[in-house]
Image (cartoon, grey):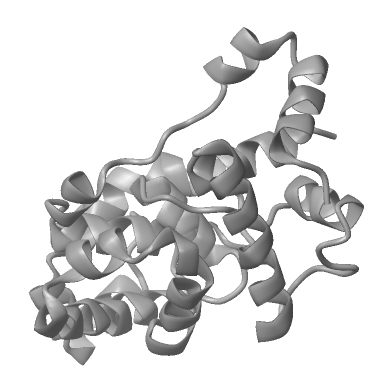
Amino acid sequence: MHHFDEIYDLAAARHGGKAALEGRLQKPKSPDELTAMPDDRWLSVITKCIFQAGFNWKVIEAKWDGFEAAFDGFDIGRCAFMDDEKFDALLVDSRIVRNGTKIATVRDNAAFLLELRQDGGAGKVLGTWPSSDYVGLLDMLKTRGARLGGTTAQYAMRFAGRDSFILSRDVTARLFAEGVVDKPPSSKKAMAQVQAAFNTWMEQSGRSLTEISRVLAMSL
């Protein structure tokens, strides 16, 4: 496995130099900023990523104001206790994408976020989970949340601004090249290997998972 500096140099060489590369790197929000993020914003970003999965992202983005209105600003109390009448109304609401399975996740994930209040709230749990155990966070989201497997939770955490990696095609290809995994990681063993590699690169560089993930993607 190459030292992170070598991978960084590859990415810089392919994207106009170090200054240009740095301009394309995104830094995550601080734990304090994430802790202060209201529950409704966590539910909003989670829901957007669920609806974007397997669908045209531009369509979801164009309709998002309608989603916000239809789901009462993603108030987690209202969403968690959505009754059948409200659910049935959403199934015919043209402001949103009328996918019953995905609409149901709003109710389920609102209930999940309500449960997190027992541990300090979504902002504290999701925002301060150690980056060195990011795969543990993903596993928790997959287990306790609704439709948060695969890369959906990874994108949700990135779009929420928390430190994260996304196992995109390009990132996975770099992990192949580095000998970290030999196929797209899905098992707990493979994900642990991915986490170990990212932890090594964090130690070598002092950078966040977010920055490292982006550099890996641009190194090809």
Is residue 174 or residue 78 the one in the foreground?
174
- Judge left or right: residue 193 versus residue 78: right
**106 w.r.t. 215: above or below:** below
The residue at 44%/42% (across/down) is 61
Q: How many marks?
A: 0
**7 w.r.t. 124: above or below:** above
- Tell me residue 164's x, y (percent): 49, 53
Dividing the picture into quarters, in which one does residue 217 lie?
top right
Q: Is residue 220 among the parts visible in the rendering?
A: yes
Is residue 32 or residue 107 the one in the foreground?
32
Dividing the picture into quarters, in which one does residue 124 lie?
bottom left
Is residue 139 or residue 9 the one in the foreground?
9
- Tell me residue 137's x, y (percent): 43, 73
The residue at 85%/34% (across/down) is 220
- Tell me residue 130's x, y (percent): 37, 64
The residue at 71%/71% (across/down) is 193
The residue at 18%/82% (across/down) is 80
**5 w.r.t. 146: above or below:** above
- Judge left or right: residue 41 versus residue 63: left
**24 w.r.t. 131: above or below:** above
- Tell me residue 65's x, y (percent): 28, 44
Dividing the picture into quarters, in which one does residue 24 lie?
top right
Q: Is residue 94 among the parts visible in the rendering?
A: no
